[in-house]
Amino acid sequence: MKVFKFGGASVKNAAAIINVATIVRQHQANQLLIVVSAMGKTTNALERVISLAQAQQSFDAPLQEIKDYHHQVIEQLGIQTPAFLARISTQVENLTAAATSTGAYDFVYDQVVAQGELLSSLILSEFLIRQGISATWIDARHYIQTDSSWREGNVNWEQTRSKVQGLKKILQSQLIVTQGFIGATPEGQTTTLGREGSDYSAAIFAATLHAESVTIWKDVPGVMSADPKRLPDAVVFDELPYQEAAEMTYYGASVIHPKTIKPLANANIPLLVKNFDDPSLPGTRIHLCRLDKLPPLIVFKDNQCLISCKVTDYSFVNEQQMGTIFNILTQHNVRINVMQNSAISFSFCVDYREPKTLHLIEALSKNFEVYYNTGLTLITVKNYDSTTFNTYRNKPGVLLEQSSRSTLQVLVRL
Ligand code: ASP
Ligand code: MG
């Protein structure tokens, strides 16, 4: 069997969903499990609902926007039967109830945002069925089991593996449509796997069902050597080793969710990245392979914050003080993207997130003299050659620079 993942952009309107159905029909001969994200920017709209609800303010406006958007697509697809509309209404009622429920912010967040994927998957599956494609909708929360780390659920692989086995029988006669991004605790409470986590869901289903391959359908022709919006001469890779793809995501390439590669690499399942606008393009195959020479790969990570900790009494930064810094970072659950030390200071760069980063700086300030800069971009050039090395090294506005034999990183104010 194969797993297909369709992201938000691939189901953003009726025309896009019709295109998905065309792709699915072409692959109907395979056993297929389809993982779908929320339509377009629905997750962001749901986040606005949550913020307003938690601030005890009216969330009517974003809720209405979400309802209108989905209803419009339903009508354009011609699937507005009373029974289906009733099903959608129930889902919207669940959404409203979740938004007004009491509980910690992160818990409420998961109960609400999950509705985006539930709605999109219901619409896609209804449309496929109306097109004469034999499909079954399943609720991913009955299969993907996580702990109760809200917004970042950790998968219980053993439980998940045993639950998904029940899907094999369905797959023999029908294709399955399910949600990305969501799971549930053993008590049945909804969890999510982190923003953009639908790719990871596809990998979880594939690894536990021993899929032949996973295909992520995207608006780009494949995995590219840089973001083509930033560097128009970026090239598409035909193939990439798992390790290379995993490292790209680590440095901030957003083409695939960072957690996706590991379960697939462990199970030796190829990951294909294909273009939904032109499925005839070959796309990129991420799999077990050895490439002699890879072209330079450039990743831009925006919204970086450079933090420098200075020892206040003019002594040198020693290991104990570094230990203090790392402990504070661990307590605040913050990941370092690049770091550097000098005699009297230790500097590192992290993703800037309010209020998290400010709390971190406050805690560090109890032990050190702390300076920080925000609004920076971390540029990573993997497999650099002399041209890329010189271009990025000599960029104006470099605050920090580091290179190894294969990788150059510069932190700049663009
Ligand atoms: N809908 C979720 C998000 O926007 C998950 C995903 O798209 O992968 O983050
Ligand atoms: Mg998405």
Image (cartoon, grey):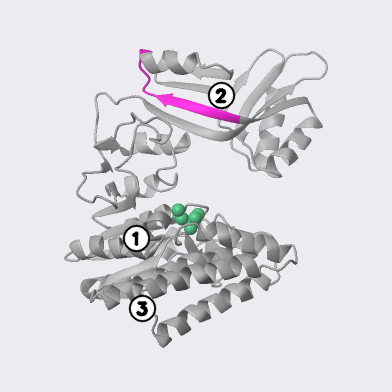
Q: Which residue is mark 2?
A: 411
Q: Residue at x 41, y 60 (%)?
A: 12
The percent coordinates of residue 268 (x first, y second) are 28, 47
Start and end of the magenta stretch?
A: 376-386
What label does residue 79 carry, if any? 3
Please tell me how crowded label 3 is: few (under 14), some (14-19), or many (20+) other residues with Cα within 10 Å. Answer: some
Is residue 27 visible in the rendered image? The answer is no
Residue 397: assigned label? none
In space, the residues marked 1 and 3 are separated at their CA atoms by 15 Å
Q: Is 4 in front, or is 339?
A: 4
Asked whether disc 3 touches disc 2, contact meaning CB atoms under 8 Å apart, the reply is no
Query: Is 316 located above or below residue 15 in the figure?
Result: above
Q: Does residue 146 show up? A: yes
Pointer 1: residues within 10 angstroms few (<14), some, or many (20+)? some
- Relative image position of residue 51 (x, y in whole percent): 67, 60
Q: Is residue 247 left or right of residue 67?
A: left
**Distance of label 1 from label 2 (alpha carbons):** 38 Å
CA gap, disc 3 and disc 2: 50 Å
Q: Amino acid at mark 1?
A: Ala
Earlier in the chain: of badge 1 and badge 3, it is 1
Asked whether the residues under the numbered discs 1 and 3 touch, taking CB atoms below 8 Å apart as contact, a structural biologist would say no
Q: Residue at x 52, y 21 (%)?
A: 410
Q: Residue at x 53, y 59 (%)?
A: 43
Residue 183, x across and y down, in percent: 49, 64
Residue indicated by mark 1: 16
